[in-house]
Image (cartoon, helix red, strand yellow):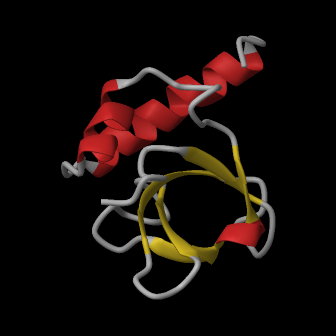
Amino acid sequence: MSDRAGRIVEAQMGRDKGKLFYVVGEAQGKPRLLLADGKGRKFAHPKEKALGHVTILTDAQREFPHPVTEKLQRGETVSNRELRRALAAFKEEMRLGKR
């Protein structure tokens, strides 16, 4: 599994600009991330996006302690519902100024 799996990113390019996604993996042989949000991009069919076209919002210094994050970091499968709820919780934290 990718060392970036479980991070939350914001798209900076394309029609999904401004949307939040979870990194669910990395494309093999390419510097691209596989992104899913559980709604427009399901876990089973993630979006492939260039690393330079996203802003990483969570990392080792700015963690988001959530069960979905932990599952993705361990390489486990998550449901689309879990992805949507985790991203909604992250957005709420951002709105409240905790991030």
Query: From what the image shows, is residue 96 above or below residue 59?
Result: above
Please give left or right for residue 82 compared with residue 76 in the image: right
Q: Report the residue that reaches farthest toward the bottom.
A: 29
Q: How many numbered callouts?
A: 0
- Quarter of the rendering occupied by the N terminus: bottom left
Above or below 49: residue 90? above
Q: Quadrant of residue 31?
A: bottom right
Identified at 35% across, 74% down, the residue is: 45
Question: Who's the residue at 70% across and 66% down the image?
Answer: 16
Residue drawn 44% across the image and 20% down it: 65
Asked if 38 appears above or below 74 in the picture, the reply is below
Is 10 placed left or right of 80 in the picture?
right
Q: Nearer the viewer, residue 85 or 58?
A: 58
Residue nearest the observer in this picture, 36 or 2: 2
Residue 12, image x, y percentages: 80, 62
Say whether residue 4 is left or right of residue 49. Answer: left
Q: Position of residue 95 (x, y in %)?
A: 75, 20
Q: Position of residue 36 (x, y in %)?
A: 45, 59
Residue 96 in percent (x, y) is at 74, 11
Q: Tell me if residue 72 comes above or below residue 64 in the rendering.
A: below
Q: Residue at x 57, y 27 (%)?
A: 90
Residue 11 lies in what quarter of the image? bottom right
Quarter containing the C terminus: top right
